[in-house]
Image: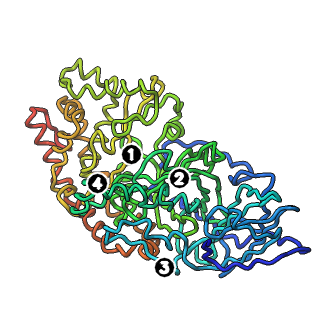
Amino acid sequence: MRHIPVKEIIRSLAGKLLRLCYFGIRLPDFRADVLPGKRSVRKTACEEPAGGLVKEDSLEEIPAISLESGIYPGKSLTVSLHAPKGYTIAFTTDGKLPSSGDDSGLSEVEVLLARGGRGYLIENRDLMVYPEAPESFLLDDPSLPSGKVLRAALRSPSGEIGKPVTRVYFLTHEFFRLFPGCLTVSVVADPAGLLDHEKGILAAGAVYDTWKKTPEAKELTEKGMTWEFQSNFTQHGRAWEKNCLVQIYDGRTVPAAELNAGIRVTGHASRGENQKSFNLYFRERYGSKFLNYELFEGICRYRSLRLLAGGNNTRRLKFKDSFLKELVSDRHFAAASSRPAVLFLNGEYWGPYLLTEKVTAQMLGDHYGVRKGQVILVKEGMLKEGKEEDMNLYRELMSFAEKDLADPCVWEEFCLLMDIRSMADYCAARIYFGDFDWYPDKNDLLWRTRDRSFNEGRWQYMLYDTGYSSGLYGNEETAPETDHFSLARQRYPLFAAALRNQEFYRMFLNSLREIGEENCSYERVKSLMADYEKAWKPLMPAYFRRFGDSGNLWMSSRRTTLRFFKKRCDLLIPLAEEYGKKENFIVCSDEE
């Protein structure tokens, strides 16, 4: 029996005219251009997508639907469907793809969609959580805003079901009050692709059932280390990418952009959170290789995007990664742009996210004007963009960890390969933040061009995933008193080797001082924190009603973050200065 969460009224409309489209009320365009966390490197001219809106692929034979996707006032909405002569209409309202069992047997139908009701995902939420995670919350709250997903297809006289058309209707007059100045992203995927036991990307599923029988599972369960569990949603790769429809609302009552895409779960330990992070991929096989829409200033097309729930900070300061990056946005390394967005998954409210550029050759090409075919990108010691032989260039760079960089000749060779200003700024930022989750094989990202067309072909850094830092969890690993400078020398051999060169050491020390005294001065941190809270606090009450009230964790994280930056400079800088003295380097004061 199919699950229909909303009331439907179906009746023949033979001899009646198809209802004309209802356009709804126009509201101001809140593009959130001044929200904190928005960054760009290079501004380019933007072109409007054809027709002003990227739509689902058109088909010769699809049902006519009276109303477009959008935000409509009122508690209910009647949508009319019409089929060409000889065809009937199959449709669903729970996100499932229409099948022959959903055939109405009619060529003209009306569907009444009513506000409220329980969504399919929440109704089946037990499939998405570990039974061993007692603090796992995924709450059913009918008062949360939601969208109604209508999927319709034609059934031919021979019984074949055509390609479905999807519409999403948000029935509320409070949409923009609930999410002020914030993008809304609606993603619709076949529920089977999300919750199927074998292949559903949000289900614990078959992978978990198999894994929990292993000795490793028994050991981790006894230790309560649920973040190390294996399940469907911890899997990687194309096999775990599902088709979906993506719509973006930017303050208007109709989508500003709409196209088909692929969706995957992303992250490390945070995959175990109920609010998971996602990657969106725009591919030709889905209909278009690009999303053509200016999400970030001057960048008008995207091959992929990330919806970040906050990583280690998912239930804390969800914006922390963007906040930290903005503190050091003037330093000599790149970072992906991000902005707040609220996600609806199959019409069900799924909380606030950081909508973020995904670091790719295309992204670097758009920002820096380099040819994407020339980009070499190495993430966590693995080649992400480039040719297999390009890893030899990375290995050549890392081989200098075993060389004497105090030797002027060796240092000169190293400087031909590495942008040392980028290295000094990047390492200073990571260390100042107290990033405990950073070393060459974790959250480390380097890139260059294969030729010398950009920055003489030297390697440079991108700041990526900074969340496990600056007082997180209030423990010693991220405390302001912890000597992350010594820890970095132990964990990052190339950095330790570079420090033995006095020129690099002084460059690094100056960067560390500037970051501590200017970028991350306590007054600046407090001011920027206030800006972020102004943008994010209105988004959190609904989040607490869906994923459990973690407001105490938010406030605790806020306190530990501010405490970290209040104490950090006075504790860390002397440690770096003492190192220089032990190496008999000339350590200048700030005034010199």
Amino acid at circle 4: Thr
**Whole-Å distance between the Cαs marked 1 and 3?**
43 Å
Q: Residues within 10 Å of mark 4 (few under 14, many from 20)?
A: few
Q: Name the mark on residue 141.
A: 3
The residues bearing labels 4 and 1 have C-alpha atoms spaced at a distance of 49 Å
Corner quadrant of residue 105? bottom right
Disc 3 marks which amino acid?
Asp
Instruction: State the image quarter where residue 276 is shown.
Output: bottom left
Q: Nearer the viewer, residue 41 or 82?
A: 82
Let me know if residue 381 appears in the view. Answer: yes
Badge 1 density bin: few <14, some 14–19, many ≥20, Cα 10 Å: few
Residue under circle 4? 214
Q: How would you rate the neighbour count of disc 2 (Cα within 10 Å): few for under 14, some for 14-19, many for 20 or more?
A: many
Q: Is residue 57 above or below residue 146?
A: above
Task: Answer with left or right where residue 515 lies relative to residue 141.
Answer: left
Which residue carries the number 2 mark?
Answer: 263
**Considering the numbered disc 2 on the image, is that residue within a helix, a strand or a loop?**
strand
Kindly identify which residue carries mark 1.
330
The mark closer to the camera, 2 or 1, is: 2
> Is 285 situated above or below 536?
above
Q: Earlier in the sequence, mark 3 or mark 4?
A: 3
